[in-house]
């Protein structure tokens, strides 16, 4: 139990940090004009059991947030996920988002790009530009960010299998803009574990992918230190049907595996851990989601400090982006999705997210129209500017319900961690990366993760069909006066234009330089000394080698991966 003196000492530490920090020039009063304190806690002299697990904002274990000022210092980044059709079309949408108040860019790629194929590959037929933007080479990156200074805008890219060559194309585009690539800031997803667990967009077996990720971690730490090379994603795990606790545990276990990867490469945990970020789902159960986010920070800080030896606060911090739950949106009565998205976004904010994407009301039908995208953006701005939620750090801290849910979420996650470690052979497994990485890989190969997610999804579906769980417009309140939506349609001309542009670029480039760059890449992949592949990939991107050519060259050595079917 934390004594009254210990709690007051913590309050004094928080006050000193708050006083030394910079706060925004904003009105921190209620709508009625009443002053509000930047943080609230137990009354002076009170003794609160377990308060050391709750603490104060900006103090270990960071349950209440990473910064003593909360959002008074800096609000969350509005980072709207967007990408469709051609690079030119997406560029126009980005400029609209930035002009409307967006704080950063988040790139959605189409399926051929996500799978490492060029737009004219047989696998790409009918898919070009449909779920994101098509990127075949660095020239597409030039168009995608035309008129958008990459040295001044943070960019997140949601791609994992071919993430490293796509990042090299991004670097090449930044160089052509004249940007200082060493100062670039943003995030690359690169999370291959969650692909095998949930999203299923991989190119090679796990080991070659982990080699590429390790190379990227090393390269960014030395050459692009502000850029985060890994965004460990729970979003896709949750969207596949996992529970909140499973999303939390599977995601953090993946993160621990990547920490072990960095350590196995000889990297300093205090140097590379701040380059790891996370990506979570904000689902519809309001308080459960808030508890999940708070528990995530606490677990990560404790494991990083006590297990992996992180000594600095930044190496113990869990920074995360949140996206509202796509799977919670309904095709029936789609205007209800505006309400769902607002509630989910509020849970992310009250949970202390660092950046946020809000889904559009029409995304169950198609990619969002400009109007739907604007409503999604305005949802965040209403929360930020009108509701007062940015005035107080962790306003739900100390709530009996929220703290009990946070503790329960942490305990469930710890039980899952124990199971994953056992699957990998335990602490003494002797895996070349580490025991948690060994457990994650064992769970992938055995199908344990997929089976557990499938069971959770099935239980929820049963509850819906029996009426125990309700969705407005789907299995309750089904009468409506709403009509059909006008949706965004991607025509076949996008594919024809993209493949024609790709053909022209291939004809205009220096083919000898491309062939030489790809030959050097294959030589480096086969080199037993295991040189860092990022500089070689960057040379190929500069020469305008296409994504499909680069991924195929590496695939000659890395091979392919086929998941065992399980029922």
Image (cartoon, helix red, strand yellow):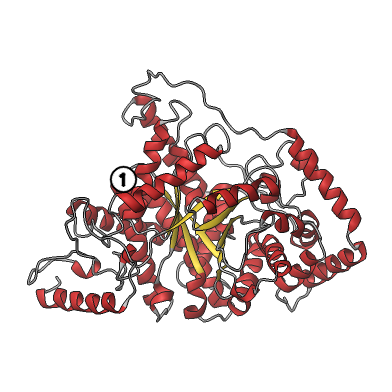
- Which residue is more in the foreground, 338 or 257? 338
* Residue 307 percent location from the top left of the image: 40, 75
Corner quadrant of residue 461: top left
Compared with 433, 334 (above or below) is above
Q: Closest to the observer: 264 or 119?
A: 119
Left or right? Give the position of 47 relative to 18: left
Q: Disc 1 designates what residue? A: 286
In this picture, is 481 found above or below 207? above
Which image quarter holds the C terminus?
top right
* Residue 422 appears anywhere in the view: no
Looking at the figure, which quarter contains the N terminus?
Answer: bottom left
Mark 1, Cα crowd under 10 Å, few <14 / some 14-19 / many 20+, is some
What x and y, as percent, mark residue 538?
74, 69
Q: Which image quadrant for residue 510? A: bottom right
State whether residue 267 is above or below residue 364: below
Residue 478 seen in this snapshot: yes
Instruction: Please state if 180 lies on the left or on the right of 80 as rendered.
Output: right
Left or right: 559, with 83 as reference point: right
Question: At which x and y percent is residue 230?
Answer: 55, 64
In-front residue for pair 428/104: 104
Comparing 24 with 154, the one in front is: 24
Helix, strand or loop at disc 1?
helix
């Amino acid at each position: 139990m934390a004594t009254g003196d210990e709690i007051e000492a913590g309050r004094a530490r928080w006050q000193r940090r708050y006083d030394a920090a910079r706060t925004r020039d904003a009105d921190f009063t209620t709508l009625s004009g009443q002053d509000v304190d930047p943080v609230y806690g137990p009354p002076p002299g009170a003794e609160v059991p377990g308060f050391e697990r709750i603490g104060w904002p900006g103090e270990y274990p960071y349950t209440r947030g990473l910064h003593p000022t909360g959002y008074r210092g800096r609000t969350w980044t509005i980072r709207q996920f967007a990408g469709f059709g051609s690079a030119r079309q997406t560029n126009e949408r980005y400029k609209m988002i930035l002009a409307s108040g967006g704080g950063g860019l988040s790139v959605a790629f189409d399926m051929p790009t996500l799978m490492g194929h060029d737009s004219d590959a047989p696998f790409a037929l009918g898919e070009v530009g449909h779920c994101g933007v098509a990127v075949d080479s660095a020239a597409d990156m030039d168009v995608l960010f035309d008129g958008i200074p990459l040295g001044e805008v943070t960019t997140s890219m949601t791609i994992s299998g071919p993430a490293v060559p796509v990042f090299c194309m991004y670097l090449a585009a930044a160089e052509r803009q004249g940007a200082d690539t060493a100062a670039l800031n943003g995030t690359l997803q690169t999370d291959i574990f969650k692909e095998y667990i949930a999203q299923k967009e991989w190119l090679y077996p796990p080991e070659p992918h982990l080699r590429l990720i390790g190379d990227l971690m090393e390269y960014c730490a030395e050459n692009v230190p502000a850029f985060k090379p890994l965004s460990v994603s729970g979003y896709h795990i949750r969207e596949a049907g996992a529970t909140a606790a499973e999303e939390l545990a599977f995601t953090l276990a993946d993160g621990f595996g990547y920490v072990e990867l960095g350590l196995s490469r000889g990297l300093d945990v205090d140097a590379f851990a701040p380059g790891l970020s996370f990506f979570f789902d904000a689902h519809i159960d309001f308080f459960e989601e808030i508890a999940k986010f708070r528990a995530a920070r606490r677990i990560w800080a404790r494991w990083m400090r006590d297990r992996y030896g992180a000594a600095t606060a930044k190496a113990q911090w869990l920074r995360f982006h949140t996206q509202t739950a796509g799977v919670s949106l309904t095709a029936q009565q789609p205007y209800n999705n505006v309400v769902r998205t607002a509630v989910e976004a509020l849970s992310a904010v009250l949970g202390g997210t660092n950046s946020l994407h809000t889904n559009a009301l029409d995304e169950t039908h198609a990619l969002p129209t400009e109007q739907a995208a604007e409503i999604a953006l305005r949802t965040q701005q209403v929360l930020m500017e009108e509701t007062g939620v940015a005035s107080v750090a962790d306003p739900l801290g100390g709530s009996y319900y929220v703290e009990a849910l946070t503790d329960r979420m942490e305990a469930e996650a710890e039980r899952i961690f124990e199971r994953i470690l056992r699957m990998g052979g335990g602490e003494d497994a002797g895996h070349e990366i580490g025991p948690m990485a060994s457990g994650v890989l064992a769970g992938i190969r055995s199908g344990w993760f997929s089976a557990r997610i499938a069971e959770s999804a099935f239980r929820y579906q049963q509850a819906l069909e029996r009426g125990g769980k309700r969705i407005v417009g789907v299995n309750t309140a089904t009468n409506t006066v709403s009509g059909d939506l006008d949706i965004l349609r991607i025509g076949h001309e996008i594919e024809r234009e993209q493949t024609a542009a790709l053909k022209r670029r291939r004809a205009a480039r220096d083919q000898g330089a491309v062939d030489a760059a790809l030959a050097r890449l294959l030589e480096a992949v086969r080199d037993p000394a295991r040189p860092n592949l990022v500089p070689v990939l960057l040379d190929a991107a500069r020469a305008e080698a296409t994504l499909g050519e680069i991924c195929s060259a590496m695939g000659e050595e890395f091979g392919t991966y086929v998941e065992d079917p399980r029922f």
